[in-house]
Amino acid sequence: MKVPLLDLKGQYKAIKEEVLNVTEQIYESQYFILGPHVQALEEQIAKYCQTAHAVGVSSGSDALLLSLMAADIRPGDRVLTTTYTFFATAGCIARLGAIPVFVDIDADTFNIDPGHMAGVIENMTRDERSSVKAVIPVHLYGQCADMEPILEIAAEHDLIVIEDAAQAIGSEYRGKRAGSMGLCGCFSFFPSKNLGAFGDGGIITTDSDEFFEKLKILRGHGSHPKYYHKLVGGNFRLDALQAAIVSIKLKHLDDWTAKRRKNVVLYGSLFTSEGLTDIVKLPLDIQDRHIYNQFVVMLPGQRDALRRFLGEAGIGTEVYYPVPMHLQECFDYLDCKKGGFPVAENAASNSLALPIYPELTDAQLAYVVEKIKAFYDAV
Ligand SMILES: *Cc1c(COP(=O)(O)O)cnc(C)c1O
């Protein structure tokens, strides 16, 4: 049996006709950049994420970069973020000449640990502390970070909060949607995200009228009015084809999320009935509504051997992420020490993402668990 980590062909089958119709219309119109399809998507996403506004952009990475630019993050400013994330989160800080300040994660959620975050600020010199301008919590794998204490610490130190919600569209924290709690939320339409385009794309949500206007201006090189530039922006535009396709998919998103969550429940009972729950730690849904962009388990060791074994059995898995940000070579200059972020380092060595996409069959899930059992029975 084959169980890929992700297979989008089934999803495409379900929406093919609608997609071909709308893309044909766009080809006929020859109107490709921004325009009515992008605006419609912006309104739909704002509503879905419970915010006043949304701004379609070229990717999730660009959503982060543009948000930091609009928040006026400058060279030498410090920005707090989790060390355990996709590279773009930290990369965007460094691209602006600002200094990423890493924080360890919570062992149960893989998300930034607010207690450690407070400690990191505490241990700074007064000068360092005054240079901290923002924090980027990441809602990793589809579960919101513990936003209440994060927002409290941010308010205390006058920090802007930019949510990296690239993996978390529709995820909730105490009744609030991802992307609605900070100054803004950054989403990605990379194809492997729960709401993926047919290429690159992203969107920023915000409740602030002022920030919304600034994002729109910076998205088009800072031009406002046309050909007059008070600000230096860039080309961060979303195109009509991607927006129209994402709009079609958005109508199915809650259904797909429900199926992911159903798979999680089935995994839970399979791991239990195979007697594996003392060995393999399953992800916990602590913050109300986890949307499971990834289903990441913690293993008692031999992760890479298990991965090879599953691969030979036709089962796709992935390691998100093998190297935390503080140990990336490009951040050597920050002088972070190995062992300095033990929870993240442990996750990097022992976590594994298993297939969770909505179209998986029960038999495929049973096969995955059976093979994991076979591996740990043999070692
Ligand atoms: C995917 C992702 C991004 C970047 O999104 P792109 O659209 O690929 O640029 C940023 N942060 C996180 C946590 C992501 O998972």
Image (spheres, grey):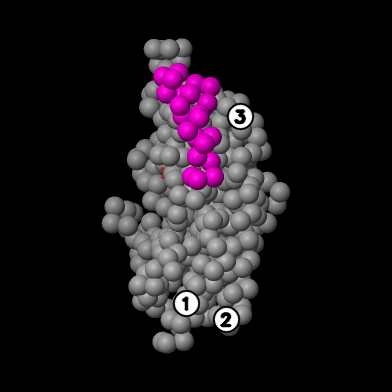
Tell me the kind of residue under disc 3: Glu
Q: Quadrant of the C terminus?
A: bottom left
Tell me the kind of residue under disc 1: Ile
**Residue at horizontal 43 percent and vertical 61 percent from the top:** 4
The secondary structure that most of the magenta stretch takes on is helix
Q: Residues within 10 Å of mark 1 (few under 14, many from 20)?
A: some
Picture coordinates of residue 242, whole percent (x, y): 46, 33
Q: Residues within 10 Å of mark 2 (few under 14, many from 20)?
A: few
Label disc, if present, on residue 372 of the rendered structure: 1
Can residue 205 be seen in the rendering of this structure? Answer: no
Instruction: In the rendered view, tell whether residue 377 sits above or below residue 296.
Output: below
Count the marks: how many?
A: 3
Pick whichever, 102 or 307, lies toward us. 307
**Residue at horizontal 52 percent and vertical 80 percent from the top:** 279
23 inside magenta stretch: yes
Tell me the distance, in whole angstroms, between the alpha carbons under discs 1 and 3. Answer: 44 Å
Write the start and end of the magenta stretch as one range: 12-37
Are discs 1 and 2 less than 8 Å apart at CB? yes
Picture coordinates of residue 215, whole percent (x, y): 50, 28
Judged from this view, the residue extending furthest toward the bottom is 378
Sequence-first tag of 1 and 3: 3
60 inside magenta stretch: no
Q: Which residue is mark 2?
A: 274
Pick whichever, 261 or 298, lies toward us. 261
Figure quadrant of residue 286: bottom right
Picture coordinates of residue 96, whole percent (x, y): 37, 38
Q: Which residue is mark 3?
A: 43
**What secondary structure is found at the residue carrying circle 3?**
helix
**Residue at horizontal 46 percent and vertical 50 percent from the top:** 8
Tell me the distance, in whole angstroms, between the alpha carbons under discs 2 and 3. Answer: 46 Å
